[in-house]
Amino acid sequence: AQKVTQAQTEISVVEKEDVTLDCVYETRDTTYYLFWYKQPPSGELVFLIRRNSFDEQNEISGRYSWNFQKSTSSFNFTITASQVVDSAVYFCALSEAGPNLTGGGNKLTFGTGTQLKVEL
Amino acid sequence: DVKVTQSSRYLVKRTGEKVFLECVQDMDHENMFWYRQDPGLGLRLIYFSYDVKMKEKGDIPEGYSVSREKKERFSLILESASTNQTSMYLCASSFFLEDRGLGSGNQPQHFGDGTRLSIL
């Protein structure tokens, strides 16, 4: 069975600090996908990034960066120079892969989320 | 932009009532999903559908049913609402697309704003 662990329930930082959100996953599949989503106070989950299990290149997008390490089954998310607008709940998620996965639906297993509070 | 619309942001119902939550997407996505979100538990999958009239149970289907009569619409039904079904309900949709031999399961899910349902 798949499992995603986000051990940090809540993190508080002061604006302009760097912050890393941890994500550890478990799966028996060799092919899988990892995702990060952001949920601001308005409630809608916003897709941030997707990674497949064969692509361990780190990715940077503006102030956001992601570190994928298969050796430790981790997919950590770093926000550089955090801002108040980054305050949200962040979810890491894992999806199985396979052309015949119940007709095509990609089920996501979510972690329990990390509440990030960025204060002035 | 993908738009996933849930019929209500807030809903209050009574124990024993039959409750319908509606979700519509405008991007011709094959897959649609219903999750519930509870503090400390993250998002848990209730049901999903990969085609019209097709449905699959998720991790917590008990007490719920679904209906997908048209591709763009996915309804969640609480047959006889109970207080332990008080929660935030999130609908999502995604394409089914195989990723160049890596299988499916790679498409990000797009979420609605959520319905906060209270059962009294």
Image: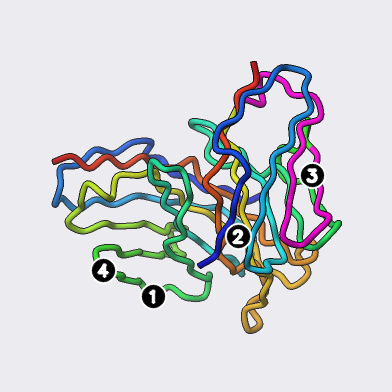
The numbered mark 2 sits on a residue in which chain?
Answer: A
Q: Amino acid at mark 2?
A: Ser
| Same chain letter for marks 2 and 1 | yes
Labels 2 and 1 touching (C-beta < 8 A): no
Q: Counting other residues with Cα less than 10 Å from the Cα at mark 2, is it few (<14), some (14-19), or many (20 or more)?
A: many
| Same chain letter for marks 4 and 1 | yes
- Label 4 vs label 1, nearer the camera: 4
Residue A61 lies, in percent from the top left, at 31, 70
CA–CA distance in space, label 2 to label 1 = 19 Å
Could you tell whether B2 is left or right of A96 in the image?
left
Report the magenta residues as a range: B65-86
Looking at the image, is mark 4 or mark 1 earlier in the sequence? 1
Residue situated furthest bottom in the rendering: B100
| Same chain letter for marks 3 and 2 | no
The numbered mark 3 sits on a residue in which chain?
Answer: B
Residue B66 tag number: 3
